[in-house]
Amino acid sequence: MPSRWERIEEGIYRFQDSCIVYAVEGPEGVVLVNAGTGEAADHLDEIAGGRPVTVLLTHHFRDHTDGAIRLREKGVRILGPYWDQEYLVDPEQHFRERQHWNSYDNRWDRFSPVRPVPVDGWMMDYETRGIAGLSWEVVPTPGMTNGASSYVVTVGGRRIGFVGEVICGTGKTTRLAPLQYNYNDYTGAWNLYHAVNRLLAAEADRLLPSLGDPVDDPADAIAAFKANLKRLEEIQPGVAEPMEDADEDDIEEVLPHLYRSKYAGAETHFVISDTGKVMSIDYGYNVKTGFQPGKSHVSNRRPILHGINGLRKRFRIDRIDATLVSHFHDDHVNGIPMLQRLYGTEVLAGEQFSDLLEHPVKYDRPCLWHEPIRVARHIPNGTTVHWENIPITLYPMSGHTRFATLICMEIDGTRVAHTGDQAFFNTGGGVGYEAGARMFTNHVYKNGLDLGCYKRFLKDLKRFEPELVITGHTRPYRTSPEWYTEIDRAATAFDEVHTTLMLLDDDTAHFGAESQGGKLVPYRAHAPEGGPIEFSGWVLNPFPTEQPARIRLVGPEGWQSETVTLSLGPREQKEIRLVLHVPEGTQCRRQPVALNLTVGGRPFGQVTEALVTVGMAKW
């Protein structure tokens, strides 16, 4: 019988399945791009001849991925796109979490695998990976899925891009339905518009899609595709507004040695030293790409580089040497693990939240980025340190979140304060402060806060007397006496409003403005081999007098915890340690257990919880 493999150019073959499966011959093996239904598993010898085979998956759609199971049974190694991993390896959990009733979320994550794909490793954005003796470049191309990637490789002297469903033929893509992420939008089309620009920058000579025809003139095909995408404006006015090419010079000057990224979701600033090194202050989302649906899911929070083009254009700098973190929220830090992987970027952070960055699994806080971030310099509060020639002093900041610092620096002879997300004003439009503006305290209880937090913030500002303020979500602005007055008004009002509305009197029992009686650490406990499980954490005395306390863990029937007694001073927060014993043979995922608290003989019930996975390989 004739071979199912069709030669399309030197060293490259295609196999028609539910998608096109490509085979690329290298000096050390064969690479298949996508898996289809797996029919290629029955024809491996025709293309591999006993050589090692690796499969690269471009995105999670099951018409591209399910066949990886059959291929894996043949000894083939499977590599997938990092940002689609939740759908590939754990579809049971995905469909368990997926909203179905009254859902306005139309992402095609329902088209993910229905059985786990045995992925051996992940292809990381912007990396160059040696596979089968060839160098494969990973190009982030969200669109059909937020985690989709394309791969560019040089074969026979020609650069070939394997692009999945990004583009096929001149001016076309395979299907529009997956681009409607929400109810009646075209968010995915915005992603594709910017994705094809990254493909263009990769300078491929030919693009090979997983559905549809090869693209032999990428520049013309991409130009036509971008024009056709903008025609969506004819049926949905306004949808084409984000379809504008990014400025190649994507930074702008604040001071001679301080710049801001034009396309950062949360503000990212760059401090440039006299020696030409660069320190970013935070590094989060790129608003020119990776547009996200409403659901907060790992796959919908993909970082894309920004600011690098401008640094290269203006200063011939193509790396970020260090990052100073203002606070832990994902929109400020989600790009930092990527920077560390690409450039070995050194991370500096305040000592009071460095552990949260390094061990996020331990904490239960909003906007928490899931990837551990290695912190090289844990900066003590109130101590002046230097990065290159820049003096930096950090002060603890509570209000928006307890895990934040007020950053005070001197740059180009100017006292610059970075206030994070602590205080904004009703000026709107990304403007920081104008005369007559009213302050918005931006406090979030679950982030952690205390009464008096804004007064302490104002005290530290007055100590430093900044001339220029940069923030997490506005343009830089200059300070004024009226600015201090307005912060003072809001700080006083913050305390008065809470004491007026809540039972926070000195002689009453309460857990403060945060209303949190305790915390368990880790919040996500994983015991793949079974228990016991050790917890630490803290409890808070709600009384203004010293009191005895009793704590224990509450879980399913048969789970055991000792009762621990301790003494708490007035309003004291004290660290705790408890051990949870689970019955032998237990298997569960994300089983909640609670911390029961009694103080001074008064029960306060189950004041906090943790999630426990036992006897399962994946949390």
Image (spheres, rainbow, N blue to C red):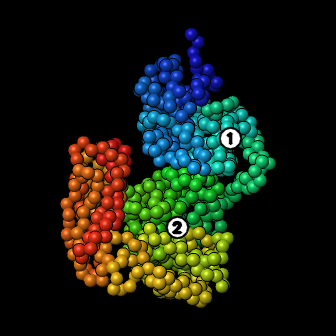
Q: Amino acid at mark 1?
A: Leu
Instruction: Residue lying at the far right in this picture: please name it.
Output: 234
Residue 200 location, x and y as percent? 67, 44
Say which residue appears at 29% left-offset and 55% top-offset: 555
Determine which quarter of the picture holds residue 427: bottom right
Per the image, label 1 sits on a secondary structure element best described as loop
**Which mark, residue 281?**
2
Q: Is residue 619 left or right of residue 568?
A: right
Instruction: Residue lying at the far top in this picture: please name it.
Output: 1
The residues tagged by marks 2 and 1 sit, at their Cα atoms, a distance apart of: 38 Å
Q: Amino acid at mark 2?
A: Ile
Discs 2/1, front: 1
Q: State whether residue 181 is above or below residue 566.
A: above
Say which residue appears at 31% left-offset and 73% top-offset: 540
Q: State whether residue 414 is above or below residue 198.
A: below
Per the image, label 2 sits on a secondary structure element best described as strand
Quadrant, the N terminus:
top right
Quickly name the residue at label 1.
176
**Which mark, residue 516?**
none
Say which residue appears at 63% left-offset and 79% top-offset: 433
Say which residue appears at 36% left-offset and 77% top-offset: 510
